[in-house]
Image (spheres, grey):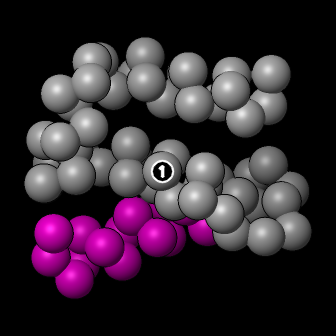
Amino acid sequence: MSFNKKTEALQAALQFAEALESDYLGTEHVLMGLLSQKQGRAAEILSQFGDIDTIRAKVLSAIYG
């Protein structure tokens, strides 16, 4: 994962945390940031577990009910 991709994933994680009005940046936000990546090694690995949109929905459900 290139530096730019890492930066994009962390920015997406921060935006996700802010959108949910979290007062911290946790691993769940970082995972959602990684899930927002359409290309790259992280997307390739995570897609092995199924459809990215389905995984994202399951993560949200696990975190926030």
Tell me the quarter of the image containing the N terminus.
bottom left
Residue where numbered disc 1 is placed: 31
Instruction: Answer left or right for 15 relative to 30.
Output: right
Examine the image and state in which quarter residue 50 appears.
top left
Tell me the quarter of the image containing the C terminus.
top right
Instruction: Answer left or right for 14 relative to 48.
Output: right
How far across and down, in percent of the image, does residue 61 sit? Answer: 68, 22
Instruction: Answer left or right for 38 relative to 65.
Output: left
How far across and down, in percent of the image, does residue 9 sit? Answer: 39, 64
Instruction: Answer left or right for 18 relative to 12.
Output: right
The dominant secondary structure in magenta is: helix
Kindly tell me whether residue 20 is visible in this rendering: yes
Part of the protein shown in magenta: 1-15
How far across and down, in percent of the image, does residue 34 sit? Answer: 38, 53
Disc 1 residue type (three-letter) = Leu
Residue at disc 1, secondary structure: helix
Label 1: few (<14), some (14–19) or many (≥20) C-alpha neighbours in 10 Å:
some
* Residue 29 magenta-highlighted: no
